[in-house]
Image (cartoon, rainbow, N blue to C red):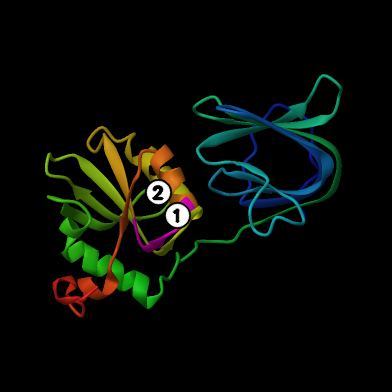
Amino acid sequence: MAPPLEPDNSVRVWPVRLVIARCQVDYAGRLTAHLPFATRLLIVKADGSVLVHSDDRSYKPLNWMSPPCTLVEGVDRHGEVEWVVEARNGDTLRISIQEIVSDSSYDLGIDPGLQKDGVEKHLQELLAQHPGSLAEGLSLVRREFPTAIGPVDLLCRDIEGASVAVEIKRRGDIEGVEQLTRYLELLNRDPLLSPVRGIFAAQEIRPQARVLAGDRGISCATVDYDALRGMDDPTVRLF
C-alpha cells in the first residue's frame, strides 16, 4: 500500500499509482470541463500522465492530462485535499478529493512494448520500402525512431527535406491519432528535426479519426496492403 495522502505542496513521483476516491474534477485549457463529485479511479502513471476513470465508459478516461506534466498535492481554500496537474502549455486539471477509499502504487518494471500483429508489422516493413506510396517524394530516414514515450513507426523526409513522422495502424481510430499527436509534440521540440508534420496511415481509417487528424494538421493515408505486397495491380481491375 502507498502511504496516506498528505496535504502538502511537494511534487510526488510514483511508479504507477491507483487511487479510488470521491472527487470533483475541473479541466481548464483550450476548453473547460467539469465533473461533479463522485467516486472514481485516479491513475498516475510513471510517464507522468494522470487519468480519471469512472466505472462505465469502457476503457476511455473521463478526463486526463498527457505527459509532460507536473502533479502537486496540497489543500484548497476549503481545506479539502487537492491535486493540481499542470501541462507545459498551461492547461490544468484540478482534482478536489473528499474521501480516499484506496491508495496503492506498484512498480510494473520495464515494458517490452507492443508486439504488433503480422499484418501491421508487415505494413510497416512494406511502407519503409515504399514510403513514396504515402506521399510523393517521401524518403525513409529510419524505422522505429525512438522517442521518450515510444518509437515512431517511420521517420521520413519529404521532397523539400522536412521531417515527417508516420504512424501505421491496420485500423485507424482516434487513439492512433492521439498517439501520433504525442509523438509530434515531442519531435517538434528537437531543433534538428523541427518542424515535423505527421501522416496517419492505415488500411481503414474511421471518419472520426479523419476529422481529429485534420484538426491536428495530420495527413491521412489509406494503405492498400495487397497492392503493396504486389498481389494486386490496380491497373488491371475492371472496377
- Chain part drawn in magenta: 201-207
**Residue 53 relative to residue 238: left or right:** right
Residue 235 in percent (x, y) is at 14, 71
Dot 1, how many residues are within 10 Å of its Cα: few (below 14), some (14-19), or many (20+)? Answer: some
**Residue 198 relative to residue 13: left or right:** left
Vertically, is 59 above or below 51?
below
Q: Nearer the viewer, residue 101 or 159?
A: 159
Residue 50 in percent (x, y) is at 62, 43
Dot 2, how many residues are within 10 Å of its Cα: few (below 14), some (14-19), or many (20+)? Answer: many
Q: Residue at x 16, y 45 (%)?
A: 158
Give the quadrant of the N terminus.
bottom right
Can you identify the residue that label 2 sits on? 180
Q: Residue at x 86, y 24 (%)?
A: 79
Most frequent secondary structure within the magenta stretch: strand
Is 32 within the magenta? no
Vertically, is 230 above or below 106?
below
Helix, strand or loop status at disc 1: helix
**Residue 174 relative to residue 60: left or right:** left
Amino acid type for the residue under numbered disc 2 = Leu
Can you identify the residue that label 1 sits on? 176
Query: Is the C-beta separation of discs 1 and 2 under 8 Å?
Result: yes
**Residue 85 relative to residue 186: left or right:** right
Q: Nearer the viewer, residue 144 or 124?
A: 124
Helix, strand or loop status at disc 2: helix
Task: Give the quarter of the image for residue 225.
Answer: bottom left
Give the quadrant of the C terminus.
bottom left
Which residue ends up furthest to the bottom in the rendered image? Answer: 231
Q: Residue at x 81, y 39 (%)?
A: 23
